[in-house]
Image (spheres, helix red, strand yellow):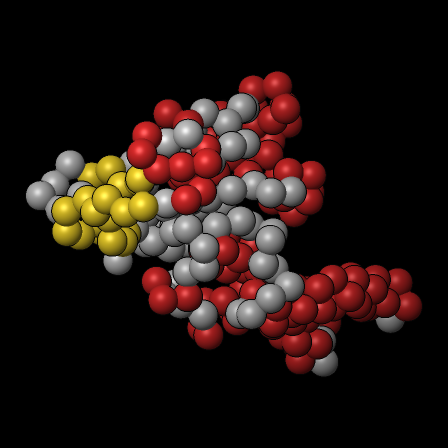
Amino acid sequence: PPPPPATMDDTEIAMRLGARAPPSACSVFWCTACAISGYESGDPVAAICKGRALPALLLQLFQVPCCCAGGVYCLVCLIQLGVPMAGALREGYALPAVLFYVFCCCAGGLYGLVFWAPLPENIQGDGTQRAISNPSCSRCLLGYAGVANFWEQGDICCGGRSFCEELAICWCGHLVWFPDASVFRRSRELHGGAALVGDPVEVADPAAAAAGTPEGRVMFQVEV
């Protein structure tokens, strides 16, 4: 979807409102790499192989074989040893393996919650925008509901919809959800905003003159 125009805050100092929402704990735990990429780059998949999102991605990929190994171990306890998993836990010999299995399956989320924080100085690009540059990959990793929540609200898991609406988007997202600039959230509470200070300044611009701008001059303000 095309980026919505910047929203101006009606205060004494004009401000382009920020669009980067600090991810919720739920988003950081379950979608660590995408949550970090979405906050820092403004796109949930554009930067998952860069910077602070890369360790989270590697840990989440490591979780896949760990989950498979945990499932195989449960089957071994049940079939080969003839001991139900609950009995193996009571006996104690399965407890270390189960704890290791649980820790490995949560490694990516724990990394995000413990070692990463949404700091405005890490925001890249235009902090007043969010984008979905690769819809297919984003839907594959986050589902339709996650993509819709991120684009509209800035958070993958917390979109402000009812449970039934979330289910409808999950199952029929291509039919019931379309990008709508009127619900694209920006606010003073979100990170990435930029203040425009001072009065507009008129300067000569040869490129603007070539494009037909009157007198080849443009107006600009300093953005901080």
Image quarter of residue 48: bottom right
- Outermost residue, right side: 80
Q: How many marks?
A: 0
Asked whether, in this view, residue 171 is left or right of residue 219, the answer is right
Front-lying residue, 198 or 111: 198
Front-lying residue, 107 or 206: 206
Asked whether, in this view, residue 43 is left or right of residue 23, the answer is right
Q: Residue at x 55, y 50 (%)?
A: 44
> In the displayed structure, would residue 89 be above or below residue 201?
below
Q: Residue 79: x and y, percent?
A: 88, 63
Quarter of the N terminus within the rendering: top right
Q: Residue 191: x and y, percent?
A: 32, 54
Q: Residue at x 50, y 55 (%)?
A: 41
Front-lying residue, 46 or 150: 46
Q: Residue 219: x and y, percent?
A: 27, 41
Q: Residue at x 31, y 46 (%)?
A: 204
Quarter of the C terminus within the rendering: bottom left
> In the displayed structure, would residue 7 be above or below residue 103?
above
Image quarter of residue 186: top left
Asked whether, in this view, residue 92 is left or right of residue 7, the answer is right
- Outermost residue, left side: 12
Q: Residue at x 45, y 59 (%)?
A: 124
Q: Is residue 26 among what the camera can see?
A: no
- Outermost residue, top side: 175
Q: Is residue 181 among what the camera can see?
A: yes
Image quarter of residue 64: bottom right
